[in-house]
Structure formats: C-alpha cells, structure tokens
Amino acid sequence: MTDTILHAENLHKSFDEINAVNGVSFEIQRGEILSLLGPNGAGKTTTISMLSGLLKPTQGQAYIDGHSVLSDAEAVKQTIGVVPQEIALYPTLSARENLAFWGKMYGLRGSYLQERIAAVLEVAGLAERADAKVETYSGGMKRRINIAVGLLHQPKVLYMDEPTVGIDPQSRRRILDTVMELNQSGLTVLYTTHYMEEAEELSNRIGIIDHGQLIALGSQSELTKTVGEFDIVRIGLEPDGLDYAALSAALQKIAGVNQALIEDDELILQAQEANAVLSKIVSTIDKANGRIRSIKIEEPNLEAVFLHLTGRALRD
Amino acid sequence: MKSLQIAWKDTLTRFRDWKALVGLLGAPLIISTLIGLAFGNIGGLGGTEAPISNIEMILVNQDAGDLGANYEEVLTSEGLQDLLNVRQMNDLEAARAEIEAGNARGVLFIPAGFSDALIPEEGSTGEEAMSGSVELYLDPAANISPFIIQSIVEQITAGANTILLAAGVTADQIVEQAELLGPAMENLAPVLTAELQPENFDFSSQKLTLNKIEVGEARESFSPFAFFIPGMAVFFLMFSMFDGSRSILLEESRGTLPRLMTTPTPIWQIILGKMGGTFMTGLLQFTILVIASTLIFGISWGSSIPGLITVVVLTVFAASGLGALLTVFARNETQASIVGSAVSLVFGALGGSFFPAENFSGVINVISKFTLNRWAMQGLTTLTIRQGGFNDILLEAGILGAIGLVTFSLALWAFQRRFVK
C-alpha cells in the first residue's frame, strides 16, 4: 500500500426527499481491498454508482487514479471495472459473445480482445463452457462470468457490488478465492457486502455504512477495539409468546449488559465479560417465563461493532 | 462506432428468440393468409366475399337508352351490393364535388344519347355509331377504391362492346351469305337486317357478372394479399417496434443498461444503439415479409424497387421513433407494453391496416391521417396495387420521414434525460 488510488470526499446523493448517501468520505490505497459493510439499503450501491460515473453526486467529489468522476468520467470508466449486483449479461448470448460485446464497449478490438476473453474465461474457470448460452449456466457460473466482464479491460480498480448474493456456498468460496487471487496480482478492490464473514476474510480495511453514512472505517482489529471488552451473547428462545419488549428492557438493566435486542426468537446481547453476567441473564429470562434453546458467546466482531454503533443487528 | 455494436447485439438477440420470431414474422404471414383465404378467392380455396366494401360511387346517368340502363343495372345488382354503395345524381358537377369533398371515390357519367350513339339508327354509318363514350371520374387521393370502380366499369364496357360487336358481325355475315345463296333467299336479307338491329337486343338480360376485378395500369388481378400483407406487415411492425423500444427498459431493470453506462461509452451512443437495434430488427422483419410474401403468395410489391425501399425504410424509421418516444414516458416495462399494444391496435384500425382508410369519412378520416399506418399503407398500396413509381410515393415518404425524424430525435433526447441521474 503505497499511494491513494481512490479518494471520495463528502459524497452526497439525494433522490427527491431521500438522502441515500450522506457525506461519505474515504480513500483506498493501491493494491488494497476495502469492503463497505452494511445492511441492504445502507447506501453501498449508491456510493459505488457515484464512484463509477453512473450517478452524479448531489454534492462532493471523487477521484479515481487522479481522474475526477465529475469532470473526467470517461477516463474514470476506463480505469475501473464494475461487477454489479445483478447478473448484467445477455442470457441468449454465449459467454464468449457476451465477453466480446462488453470488451468492445471498453474499446477492445481484434486479437487483443480475443486474448483478453481467453484470459478472463480462465479466471472464471469457464473456458470449456464458453460457447454455451449464458441462460443455460448455473447461478454460480453466471456470477463468475459477471465478474469476468469486469476484468476484460484490465482495470486498475475493481468495484464488486455484493457479488455473492444468492449463490451456493461452493460458488461463493470460489468467488472469494478469485477476489483474493486478483488482489494478490495487484488489483485494487472496492467490495460491498452485507455478509460480515466476507468482509472479515477479504478486506485490508472495512467501512461500516448505515443510513447513507460511513460510521466506522479501519482494519478489523481497529474496528473491534471500538467495542472494547464487549462480547456478543446469542440466546435462542422457544417462541412461547414472550413479551419481548419487557424482557429486553429487563435485560438492559443488568449491570454489564450494554445492548439487548430480539430478532427472530433470538436474543442478541452486548455484554462486558459475558461469562460473569450470564447467570443473571438466564435468571431474568427464567423470571419472564422464557425457555432457552441455545446459548452462544462470541468474541467481539464486526457484528458487535455494528450493534454497538447502530443499536441494530447487521441483518436488520 | 459502439452504437452499431449495440444495435447488432440487439438484432442478434431478437432473432435468436423463437418466441419473438413468431411475433415478428409468423403472425403477419399467418393472419394475412387467414384473412386472404377468408375474403379472397385464392386458388379456389377461399370464399368470394368482398374484402373491401361500401365503396362510395355516384352514377350520373343522363342516357335514356338501354346501354345506360345496363350500366345502372349491373352497378346496382345484388352481386355488387356489398362492394359498391351507388348513389344516383343528375348533376355531373355536383357529383364531382362529392369526390373533392371526400364523400365519393368515383363518378360514372353516362351522357344523354349514349345508347343512341352506339346503336345506330337505320341508314347511319358504323363509324358514327361507335363514337359514344362514358366518363369516369376517380378520387386521386385514394388508392384501392378508385381502381376497383374503374375495373368494374371497364368490365361492363368490355361486355357491352363484345355484345355489340358480335351482333353487328353476325348480322352482316348472314345478310351477305343470304344474298349469295340466290334468289330464294333474297327475301331473307331485309328481314334479318331488320331483326338483327341492336335495338332489338335486350342488353339488360345479359348477365354481366363480376368474375374478377382488374386494377392498375398493368391490369394485374387484384389480390386481397396485395392489401392485407402490407396491412399486417405495418400492423405487426408497430408491435415489434414498441417491443424493441421496451427492451431499453428491460435492460434497465436487468442491470445491463446501468452496466453499459459504466463503460466508456457516451450515453447518446448507448441510446442510439438501442434505438438503432429496434430499427434494424424492423427493417429485417419487413424485408423478410416482403420476400416471403412474394415467394409464398406471389404478390407484387410493385415495379419500383427504390420506391419500395424508401417506403419500407421510412416506415420502420417512423415506427421505431414513435415506439421509442412512447416508451420513454412509460414508468416501467408493463406500462410500456400496455401503451404499445393499445397504440398499435388503434393505429392499425384507424390507419388502414385492416380496412382501406380511404373509405373512412368525416372525423375518422381526418384522425386517420395522424397515424403513421395511414401513410405507410398509402405508400405501400400505391406500389402494390396502383403499381406506382418512386414519384408517386414522395408525399408519403416525406410524411413518414418527418414523423421518424421528430420522434427519433425527441426520444433520443428524452432517454438521455431519463437515464442520466
């Protein structure tokens, strides 16, 4: 990590009355993977859209490899590769035809285009199925071709917007491995996800985004330090018609319990020295006539950070 | 140019979709065949019901003789009742004014003494006898109806001429032969001469049936396909152009349009490419229909290839422009689909894809002129039915070109405004 390749400064984007992005600023160093972690609707895609020249910021500025997204969008688009959340391919065309079309949109021609198509097909592991129509592919294969399109013109920065949504664990594993391999070859990656595990595994740094604001930015260890000694305690409850609001209020009165929220019959608590207060927690649940199904104590992680910062679970 | 790449990609994907192909090519050919077989008399397979009906015609018959009555009887006969709506007037100028007012497609004028001129009085010469003529006034603004009227009148005239000629020749020959046979037959000559005078023939008893309607200068047989194939081609072209334009919204929702916008391709080139793809698809669709209908149904698309190319290209241009313009204001694909189908149907009905628009009268006729189908059909039938040339379709070409230019430019501008956020 030697120099800044992406610099976003006070980005805002409003749609009518809604502020989708509200003052987002960050930098990405060359060769870095930075993940934007946040729930659906947090503003991740809107941020990427502004950085790729698809949306004009209502306010703010961004530079990619020295090119302004406002005044030099053409150069920005040549510098970046974009892997959108949707499978943005033409299903009735083959993978090779899709790649040829998208390559031409990036200005590639002739033998160089053919070389690049062959190269990205290798990266996607789909060289043997290259002439089959995309509509005949599995979800994972489509995702891999979707990524391959973004690599065709050898971009300096690759934006990947939730590239593992809706695919099987095996395909997800393969995509994550590919991202790490690409990064090892020198590619800078801006990655968005709402899966905490992906952000933890891939990223040099993580930005936590919620309600259009970047609420935390740093390495995983830097972020978890912000939570301090708080552990996450997850308690599975039998759905017995408990008064969850009353139970939550009672639990937060216990000394050492910082946050308590209930989601899908699961009690999520943020507690200092969880082992010390666990007996009081169980006792409170018992008094409320709750029946415990499971108990799990987790070390501070990004979920704890998110809970700590927003008072909500990441998947909310 | 990247626009061409986008246009070609769209054309390729469209023609690979067999469901789309059914709509693009199958439907117009199948429906034309069904309508043609139902209304035409194709190869003896179909019925003989007139595909075109209630053509407004005026008869000004000032002749008091049998021949004038013969025209009147045939024109108002039961066989032509559905096809022609014949009114009788006495004043030729008033009748011609009806054409100019758009209330009639043709006027047949039979002058006073017409029968007398053709059926010679005793002692008059044959040359004088054949100098009588009827006058036919046709609406130059209409394509099909005037030619049907002209054909019917020509049929009646030809039939009458045949009878007159046959009667004259036979009488002359018998008289001549009778004289040669000798004195015994001498008395026969004056009797035959008197009996075979044309006025003794009852022309009204001749059954001048309408076997076929001949139209155009080339006197080609009028085929319902010459009307219905262009009609259905334009009608289904409208559908496919709306459908093609809708693909922009489809690409937006599928994410390929936003992805295109993240490539270093100017937005105007993307939109132009999308609209160009619709245009190319339409052009290919129409070209295949022209070739297929020529090979399958043997219809003639006229003798003017430049004229045909001009009308087809400008029709597709106008239809793709209109499709794009209406699509740009649609909220989503569903709305675009509903609006597209509605406009295609209304334009098809008002613009003459199902019935000759020239037979419309009053407000409908005026409204019809605001549809591009009207001008496309007028241009195409000028070529297929009237066998007109390039110069005959200039008005239609100009109007279609103007519609295309305005709608295409507006759509290009409006799409950019819609997608650049």
Image (tube, grey):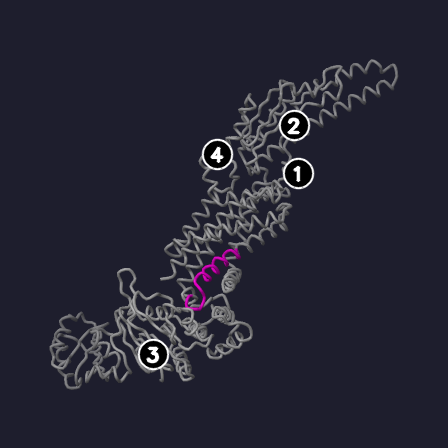
Question: Is residue A176 placed above or below B418 in the rendered structure?
Answer: below
Mark 3 falls on what kind of element? strand
Amino acid under label 3?
A: Ile
Disc ID at residue B207:
2
> Mark 1 = which residue?
B219
Asked if the stretch drawn in magenta spans residue B272, the answer is: yes
Real-space Cα distance between discs 4 and 2?
33 Å
Tag 2–tag 1 contact (CB < 8 Å) = no
Query: What is the x, y in percent for residue B47?
Result: 59, 39
Closer to the camera: disc 4 or disc 2? 4
Question: Is residue B381 placed above or below B74 in the rendered structure?
Answer: below
> Mark 4 or mark 1: which comes first in sequence?
1
Closer to the camera: disc 4 or disc 3? 3
For disc 1, the chain is B
Closer to the camera: disc 3 or disc 2? 3
Disc ID at residue A28:
3
Closer to the camera: disc 1 or disc 3? 3
Real-space Cα distance between discs 2 and 1?
22 Å
Amino acid under label 1?
A: Arg
